[in-house]
Image: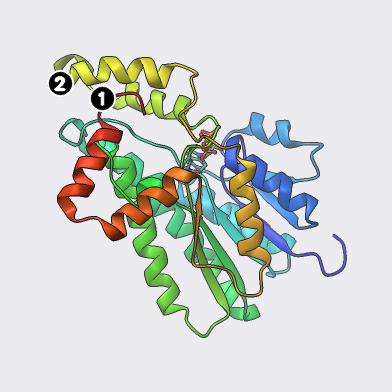
Amino acid sequence: MEAGQRSVLVTGCSSGIGRATALLLRQHRYRVFATVRRTEDIAALAGTGLESLSLDLSSSDSIRAAVAEILDKTQGCIHGIVNNGAYGQPGAVEDLTRDALREQFETNVFGTQELTNRIIPAFRAQGSGRIVQISSLLGVVCLAYRGAYSASKFALEALSDTLRLELRGTNIHVCLVEPGPISSRFRENAYQAYLRHIDRAHSVHRDYYARVEARLGGTKSLPFTLAPEAVADKVVHALGARRPKIRYPVTVPTRFLAAARRLLPGRALDLLAAAIGSSGQR
Ligand SMILES: NC(=O)c1ccc[n+]([C@@H]2O[C@H](COP(=O)([O-])OP(=O)(O)OC[C@H]3O[C@@H](n4cnc5c(N)ncnc54)[C@H](OP(=O)(O)O)[C@@H]3O)[C@@H](O)[C@H]2O)c1
């Protein structure tokens, strides 16, 4: 480790935003603990200059072991954490089973918060820290058929906003990065969650699902899609700026819908969200 080098833990580095963020942080001379769920992904990251280890957000044992290893390797000194690992569970709200919702929250909310809470004592002991939460456009507005994922990101936003109030005056900052469409394996992984949990054949929404299967199973990008580096840039700012922002919207759709949410009456926002969300094209 180089003298004065700052350590950062990033979750979900097997692909997409997590991988791009870990690599960009490395370029910015951070010591990066890039965590993944599968052993083959640890091997795939070898040779990138990242220190890779296993962390599955759905397992408390895995979280505990990863935090212990990182705090041991850094003598308890860690500059920041990037809570990126997550997935989307598509499906109409009335088709979501308890198991589907529970799995969604286990990873995106409970595991993420458990991990954060295991790092905060180290931040408090050193008198500083950065918590960077990868939220979503769907943590700002709701679109049809994305209720489980939106609920998880709204929960992440609520926990982050509350935590920030509780950490006032500690020099521990909580920042929310809110991407819209980003090219990654997100859609592929969401499609698997959809196949795993949604009973398409018996749903009143089966016509919509037929359209969504073409979208989620296909490769066509949504309008305004950006590369994962666009998110990584914001994370670099959130970790390095003297006064980081509370929110970093990324992509035109996030900026547009965040403004619409602030400005439009509820029914007008519903009309807009319905037009965007129910066609099966997004
Ligand atoms: N792509 C978008 O359009 C978009 C838009 C808004 C927000 N986001 C957010 O951006 C973040 C990164 O997503 P992405 O677009 O880069 O998608 P991605 O390519 O699917 O990457 C998601 C990462 O999360 C990991 N992950 C999933 N479940 C996990 C678990 N239980 N424990 C630990 N890691 C887990 C995945 O690991 P495996 O490879 O093992 O599954 C993968 O490394 C997520 O928080 C997502 O909600 C994405």
Q: Residues within 10 Å of mark 2 (few under 14, many from 20)?
A: some
What residue sits right under mark 2 in the picture?
203
Residue at point 79% right, 39% down? Answer: 48
- Is ligand 1 less than 8 Å from the beta carbon at label 1? no
Residue 198 marker: 1
Q: Position of residue 278 (x, y in %)?
A: 25, 30
| Vertical order, 277 against 169 (above or below) | above
In the image, taking residue 222 as reference, residue 259 lies left or right, namely left
Instruction: Please identify the quarter of the rendering in which residue 156 is found.
Output: bottom left
Considering the numbered disc 1 on the image, is that residue within a helix, a strand or a loop? loop
| Vertical order, 245 against 178 (above or below) | below
Q: Residues within 10 Å of mark 1 (few under 14, many from 20)?
A: some
Q: Nearer the viewer, residue 44 or 274?
A: 274
| Vertical order, 241 against 37 (above or below) | below
The amino acid type found where label 1 is placed reads: Ile
Q: Quadrant of the C terminus?
A: top left
Q: Earlier in the sequence, mark 2 or mark 1?
A: 1
Q: Position of residue 150 (x, y in %)?
A: 32, 45
Q: Quadrant of the N terminus?
A: bottom right
Residue at point 29% right, 55% down? Answer: 261
